[in-house]
Image (cartoon, helix red, strand yellow):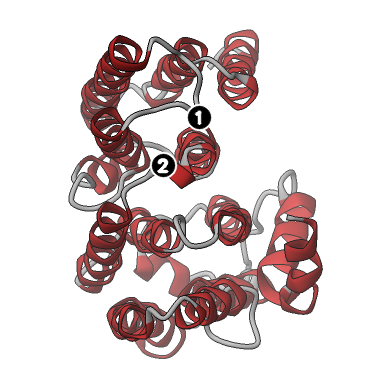
Amino acid sequence: MNPLALMIFLLSLAIGTTITLSSYHWILAWVGLEINTLAIIPLMTKIPHPRAIEAATKYFLTQAAASALVLFSNLINAWQTGEWNIDSVSDLPMNALSIALMMKLGLAPLHFWMPEVLQGISLSTGLILSTWQKIAPMTLLLQTSHLINLDLTIILGLTSILVGGWGGIGQTQLRKIMAFSSIGHLGWMIIVLKFNPSLTLFNFILYIVMTASMFLSLMTLTTTKMSEISTSWSKTPTLTASTLLILLSLAGLPPLTGFAPKLLITLELVKQDATLLAALIMLASLLALFFYLRLTYIVSLTLPPNTPNSFSFWRTSNKSLPITAIMNTLALIFLPLTTTLLIFL
């Protein structure tokens, strides 16, 4: 892609998210979401392949439907209350608005577009879709968290954790695995949204760090399938080992970074007398833990070939290694500092 065009599209992504983050009026928030959607579609189609065109079409149709529902709910709210402020939404429009924003995020049962779209695009665009594109709708949900229906968040959150675990079990494509991982993590965030919004924001920040580090590692290894990771052992052993550890961090195993949000969310639910809900989401997350452990075990121990056929090794591109190293470090050993981050939130 032309560097000038790429810069324009990335700048449009930044502007769209900034408009949504800084808006106090629903029309401005909607405009920011629309700019975000339109800016990423050319990035999806930069590889002229039918899979990429199909993914961009699915993404556009889904996001257009969600944006229409956002605008429709805002119009109903303005008709009922006479206001366009973000924090003044009545019950019926709020339910429609929450569903629309959750559809933009890819929460189950509105998740069907997410694995297919992520599978059809490049890893770099997948990184943007899994991290940056979720900032604007998640911010709107955080701003309206005191108005959201509690039953809706619990049902969609629990469904997302189950779907994220079940869907990822049979996958061998790493992009689809990351899509179902994203669905499961968003389920954890949404469940605690009504109880403690700052904890949702904390979980979201760590989710972005872990997901970005995973995508950056896969981009450096130029890997999209499980079998391709096994062939990289002899070429970049340190990066391959850290990639597998990031998978365990995404699973939420101590003493890695991903353990902090799961522990704090469980403690918050117990504190709010939702012990049964805490037990249910911990049991449901065992499904995700299974496919993360299975992926790590299969890649590290069982998939051939683990040794190269030649004495000359290729080396990975060095241009993204510094940022990859920083993000991998944060995704693995940030656990002792997570409480400090939570204090600032």
Q: Which residue is mark 1?
A: 87
Residue 109 in sight here: yes
Secondary structure, mark 2, is helix
Measuring from the top left, give residue 45's x and y in whole percent. Answer: 36, 22
Measuring from the top left, give residue 178's x and y in whole percent. Answer: 39, 58
Q: CA distance from mark 2 to mark 1?
A: 8 Å
State whether residue 232 is above or below residue 197.
below
- In which quadrant is the C terminus drawn? bottom right
Horizontal side of 292 relative to 50 (left or right) equals right
State whether residue 65 is above or below residue 219.
above
Horizontal side of 192 relative to 68 (left or right) equals right
Measuring from the top left, give residue 224's x and y in whole percent. Answer: 40, 55
Q: Residue at x 67, y 49 (%)?
A: 317
Q: Which residue is mark 2?
A: 147
Residue 166 falls in image quadrant: bottom left
Looking at numbered disc 1 in the image, what kind of residue is underneath it? Answer: Asp
Q: Residue furthest front?
A: 81
Label 2: few (<14), some (14–19) or many (≥20) C-alpha neighbours in 10 Å: some
> Foreground residue, 342 or 8?
342
> Foreground residue, 139 or 325?
139
Q: Residue at x 36, y 60 (%)?
A: 187
Q: Return the disc, 2 or 1, that comes first in the chain's sequence.
A: 1
Secondary structure, mark 1, is loop
Label 1: few (<14), some (14–19) or many (≥20) C-alpha neighbours in 10 Å: some
Q: Tell me whether circle 2 and circle 1 mark residues in contact (CB < 8 Å).
A: yes
Residue 234 in sight here: no
Measuring from the top left, give residue 259's x and y in whole percent. Answer: 57, 79
Looking at numbered disc 2 in the image, what kind of residue is underneath it? Answer: Leu
